[in-house]
Image: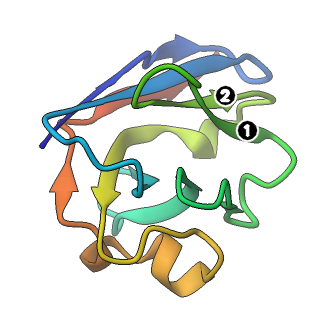
Amino acid sequence: VQLQASGGGKVQPGGRLRLSCAGSGFTSDNYAIGWFRQAPGMERQGISCFASTDDSMYYDDDVKGRFTVSKDSASNTVHLQLTSLRPEDTGVYYCAAQFSLPTCMFPEAAATPSRYKFWGQGTLVTVSS
């Protein structure tokens, strides 16, 4: 299983970015892709999740209403649209996959890094004027 995260960059406050997580090396249609971010000196924080099994989604309160997760219908690519970006959104954004509990209905499972077995390499988002 391989995950390739992309789309990071530097934007001004209020700006937007679209992150993508391309998954390969698996044939299962039942998986959950989680999005995490890690600011300097901080722990990795679960911010969003999308499950192909049941189309369930999860958003952390910090990003609810500003970020939107979606999946390409024809591929194993999950996107995270970031809008109304704030300086505190700065960090490395990672995507991760799990197949053992492929749903985002349970926040604890959706946002806990240890629940995910496979990780992408991360993409840096910097929000600064």
| 44 to the left or right of 102 | left
The residue drawn where x is 73% and y is 52% is 63
Please name the residue that numbered disc 1 is placed on.
Answer: 68
Could you tell me the amino acid type at mark 2? Gln
The quadrant in which residue 67 appears is: top right
Q: Nearer the viewer, residue 76 or 67?
A: 76
Residue 24 image offset from top left, x and y in percent: 20, 30
Please give the count of numbered marks on the rendered protein. 2
Residue 64 image position (x, y, % from top left): 80, 55
Looking at the image, which residue is at 65% across and 35% down? Answer: 70
Q: Position of residue 99 (x, y in %)?
A: 30, 65
Q: Residue at x 20, y 50 (%)?
A: 119
User: Is residue 102 shown above or below 47?
Assistant: below
Q: Residue at x 74, y 16 (%)?
A: 15
1 relative position to 38: left or right: left
Q: Who comes first in sequence, dot 1 or dot 2?
A: 1
Name the image quarter holding the N terminus: top left
Q: Amino acid at mark 1?
A: Thr
Residue 34's tag is none
Element type where label 1 sits in the image: strand
* Quarter of the figure with the C terminus: top right
Dots 1, 2 in contact, CB < 8 A: yes
Q: CA distance from mark 1 to mark 2?
A: 5 Å
Q: Mark number for residue 81?
A: 2
Within 10 angstroms of label 2, few (less than 14), some, or many (20 or more) residues?
some
